[in-house]
Image: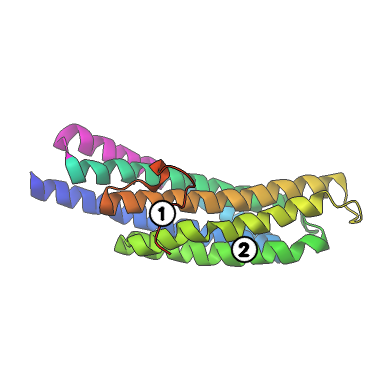
Amino acid sequence: MRVIFNEEMKAVADDLDHMAQNVRKAIRGAGKALLETNVEAAQAVIDGDTELDALQESVVDQCVKLLAKQNPVATDLRVVVSTMRLAITFERMGDLAKHVAEASRRAYPASPLPDEAKDAFTKMQEFLDETSDNVVAMLADRDAKTAERIILDDDKLDALHKQTFDLALNEDVEMTRQQIIDLVLLGRFFERLGDHAVSAARQVVFIVSGFDPSKTPGPDKEGMTE
């Protein structure tokens, strides 16, 4: 029974790794669509979301079957439950990337952003590109140190997100109502991508150590190593 569990869990882990790689691809494609006004990149992200949805459903279904047939306990139970949560998180990240791509496609051939917002969004995209690389590496190696770094670095994205709000409220910047709406929504999509990466990192820490950073009293990042 143990051999069967390990084999089935390996298949689930492979699907989860595939999801993480697809999320990274979607984030990069969404950024290219937004910052380069590239409608082909936007469409590729939108079309690719179907595969992410299917993978999420497959991972959750496999985990439910493992719970029903194998009755895992202790560490095995922790891995199965966290794997389901990770799949749901990755699917949501794919949806957010899709929302960015859809906004870019809708505004094409123009950009949904005013020129004044390009610098902040370029920096946010660079941050998310690096974070998505870290998520893939973290998941492949079950690396708690990389997970902790993702959690600790999230403040940087929050600071950039605040810049988008400041710009939206700046009466000296000429923007249409649609641009203001897109600026606020796109900033929120980028910020939520970072939040979901943090959620994924917490699940990996939980898998590895049994410690749940989200349950720590006080600020979310308390208890993390520097």
Indicate the position of residue 29 as horizontal and vertical percent values. 58, 61
Q: Is 41 on the left or on the right of 85, as rendered?
A: right
Q: Is residue 179 visible?
A: yes
Q: Which residue is mark 1?
A: 201
The image shows a total of numbered marks equal to 2
Q: What amino acid does circle 1 point to?
A: Ala
Indicate the position of residue 169 as horizontal and vertical percent values. 83, 48
Picture quadrant where residue 54 is located = top left
Q: Residue at x 82, y 58 (%)?
A: 114
Q: Which residue is mark 2?
A: 125
Q: Is 74 on the left or on the right of 190, as rendered?
A: left
Q: In front here: 40 or 210?
A: 210
Q: Residue at x 52, y 67 (%)?
A: 130
Q: Secondary structure at mark 1?
A: helix
Q: Quadrant of the N terminus?
A: top left
Magenta span covers which residues? 55-73
Labels 1 and 2: the sequence-earlier one: 2
Q: What amino acid does circle 2 point to?
A: Gln
